[in-house]
Image (cartoon, rainbow, N blue to C red):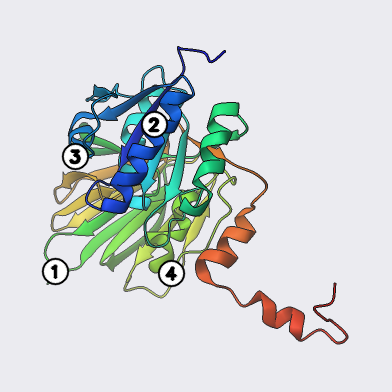
Amino acid sequence: MSDPTRSVLIVAHTSRQRIVSLASRARDELSSAGFEVRMLSREANECGVCSTRSVDGPHAADGCELVLVLGGDGTFLRAAEFARPSGVPMLGVNLGHVGFLAEAEPHAFDTTVAAIVSRDYTVEERVTVEADVCVDGEVVGTAWALNEASLERTNRERMLEIALSVDGRPLLRFGCDGMLCSTPTGSTAYAFSAGGPIVWPNVEALLLVPNAAHALFARPIIVAPQSVVEIELLSHEGVLSCDGRRSVDVPAGARIRLRRGVQPVKIVRLGAWTFTDRLVSKFQLPVRSLREATPGDTDDE
């Protein structure tokens, strides 16, 4: 007999009909399995779903077993705003382009729903980053990110002059277009585009990645998870963007204090698909050429 108290929040990118159809299908299958299915009010209306519980606000996922995300990485980051404060794990079904944050593909949707019903999955915690913007020693804004916190210029004609310190000790000073503090999860996102390294998501660390720095030493730096990073904005104003979703204005002379987030984001893992497999698949890495170059290797095995 199904447990009537089990709940799932579905977050969907409802601007695409394929995702709307899949959301309705997920609602039907999970409801039949005895779940209370929740959706955000606007998304429930756009899906034409009337038998779900409509929810809104930061506590929409409270009491849920997991958050099922139907969409791409942008939808996943939006859903994290509900999952993180409730401590609820997230399971993404990739219906976007790259889908690095998603665990499942749409062709395996029946298997994914079956895994949810039978609780046949594991949960891992991902490091987050928290940021305080301080002016004259007073915190004037806070934000958090699963992927990255990015200091960016607001005037495209002027570069930012910044001073970087780690654990209270000065490290670098240079002009740049911006500065990123990324988590290992975000190392395949904006930080990768800015020239940062790929870091396995179970590594506990923070990545510092300059964006178009005008300096002799402008390499990415990986710091310990307990380190506190400070970026002082020496000239012009900027903006701190977290996951491209939450932003804080940064006036000239302000300091940004960055550290590992107190609360992680929990992500559902299905099966034994490793991060190495994900890299090969998403970046279409040429592993076959390595095998084909091996003398005596055949496809008969």
Q: Is residue 101 above or below residue 287?
A: above
211 on left or right of 246 = right
Looking at this view, is 37 or 261 the one in front?
37
Looking at this view, is 86 or 221 the one in front?
86
Residue marked by disc 4: 195
Q: CA distance from mark 4 to mark 2?
A: 44 Å
Q: CA distance from mark 2 to mark 1?
A: 49 Å
Q: Is residue 226 above or below residue 97?
A: above
Pointers 1 and 3 in contact (C-beta within 8 Å): no
Nearer mark to the viewer, of 3 and 4: 3
Q: CA distance from mark 3 to mark 4?
A: 39 Å
Locate the N terminus and report the quarter of the image it occupies: top right
Pointers 2 and 1 in contact (C-beta within 8 Å): no
* Residue 153 image-quadrant placement: bottom left
Pointers 3 and 2 in contact (C-beta within 8 Å): no
Q: Position of residue 295 (x, y in %)?
A: 85, 87
Q: Position of residue 290 (x, y in %)?
A: 72, 80
Pointers 3 and 4 in contact (C-beta within 8 Å): no
Q: Residue at x 28, y 67 (%)?
A: 176
Residue marked by disc 1: 156
* Residue 189 image-quadrant placement: bottom left
Q: Is residue 213 above or below residue 125?
A: below
Q: Residues within 10 Å of mark 3 (few under 14, many from 20)?
A: few
- Give SS at disc 1: loop
Q: Earlier in the sequence, mark 4 or mark 2?
A: 2
Q: Earlier in the sequence, mark 1 or mark 3?
A: 3
The amino acid type of the residue labelled 1 equals: Arg
The amino acid type of the residue labelled 2 equals: Asp
Whether residue 225 is visible to the viewer of this picture, yes or no, is no
Locate the C terminus and report the quarter of the image it occupies: bottom right
Nearer mark to the viewer, of 3 and 2: 2
Q: Residue at x 49, y 40 (%)?
A: 127
